[in-house]
Image (tube, rainbow, N blue to C red):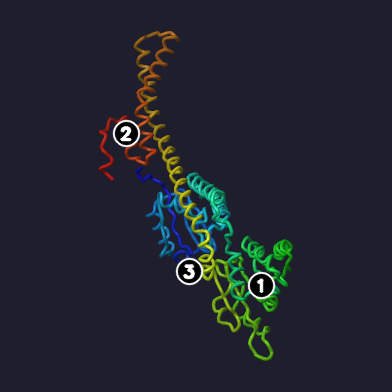
Amino acid sequence: MHEPLVPLAIAGVSHHTANVTTIESFRFAGEEEFLAAARERFAGVLLLQTCNRVEVVVEGDQASLRDFLDGNGRKDYFIHDGTGALRHLFALASGIDSMIVGEDQILGQLRKALTDAQESGTASSFLETCVNKAIHVGIEVRRRTLINRGAVSIGSAAVQLAETEIGTLAGRHILVVGSGEMGLLVAQALAAKNLTAMYVANRTYGRAEILANKIGGKAVRMADLYHYITLSDVVISCTSAPHPVIHRQDLARAMKDRCWPVEGHPRPLLLIDIAQPRDVEDGAGSIDGVRLFTIDDLRTVNEQTMSTRKAEADRAHGFVEAELAIFLRHLNRKNADELLGALHTWAETVRVRERERALARLGTADDKTAAIIDDLTRVLARKLLTDATFSVRSSAEEGDMPAAHALVKALTTGEPLRDTRRQE
């Protein structure tokens, strides 16, 4: 099968090759401004930004996307185009490419990226088709395999890391900063840990109350954040703020209030920052008593859980490849339909012209004669194009669009039919 022409390109950085600092520096702070600028360059574009990846998906070619990103000061990124871009998109939606293999959050993140693009007017029909198909593949992978059986999200991986670092969480005081999707995942993972107290802080107090009520915790105001940091054994921060919400100097003062009178050192605080961009200001990890962990530290959790799901991930890869082949044939059929539409429009023009010439030569033909001639020319045109239609469609479905175009051009313009295989 020939490599089909797929006008799709994807570029970005992810946990595979970049640490949290690199991913943070690659992010686009103003998503609406980014989409508006990209709209001038591409037929369609969407921006996927999560805690461990930033990816730009465009209806366009690799060279144009590279030029656009370089012009925006981005470097050291991966890039896929054509079939490779589709394969990456399908694997991404399936959870195969996630840091926590099999996690489900990527499906919601892809839907949101598509919705944002639609609201900004940058989601072309082709991009919508590709992303919706990827989401469908992701759902089917989870239905047909056990890739997400026992899988953990980034949020529950943070809880698992906390448990590994300090032993049992039973009887502990834990503060969750942020009440969005990630905050909910963290809180749900903590709910079964028999904590003495769980606090939920959020910039909007009402949202903190909603989450706290769901999991039997206590909502706290951001103005009281450092007071509750003083009371807590573990702080897991996961807001969507574009800037740090836990500042080094304020945290240092809070740690002084945790000092044991005899030893003069503060009670240890486990601080896990899984936000992107980061919630905790640089330098906070050097404060006496603070043990700071970031998303990069969650890789070990994935390595531990991945071994149990490797066979399912292999099955998922096989399903992705099968669905990719089906989808490529679908795209090729659409291309064939457009090409055949042009061929049959040309044939209809010739048919009508020759019908009118014949009727003119007959002079005053009655309605029955005119109808017979019309039917005759219509049947002849259709039968003469039957084999050509089959050849064009077959070439297109096999991904050999140059051959399909050459066939149509030879029929409609008389241009010699060249062997397109020599050009590959």
In this picture, is 87 found above or below 357?
Answer: below
* Residue 412 image point, x, y percent: 32, 30
Give the label, 2 or 1, closer to the camera. Answer: 1
Could you give the CA–CA distance between mark 2 and mark 1, rounded to whole angstroms? 70 Å
Q: Are marks 3 and 2 in contact (CB under 8 Å)?
A: no
Find residue 19 and name its label.
Answer: 3
Instruction: Check disc 2: other Cα within 10 Å, few if <14, some if 14-19, many if 20+.
Output: many
Q: Which residue is mark 2?
A: 407
* Residue 279 image point, x, y percent: 59, 70
Residue 36 relative to residue 221: left or right: left
Q: Which residue is mark 1?
A: 169
Residue placed most toward the observer, 38 or 135: 135
Q: Which residue is rendered at x = 44% and y = 41% of the image?
A: 331
Mark 1: amino acid: Leu
In this picture, is 230 found above or below 396?
Answer: below
In this picture, is 274 found above or below 143?
Answer: below
Give the label, 3 or 2, closer to the camera. Answer: 3
Of the 4 image quadrants, the one containing the N terminus is top left
Is tag 3's residue or tag 2's residue first in the polypeptide sequence?
3
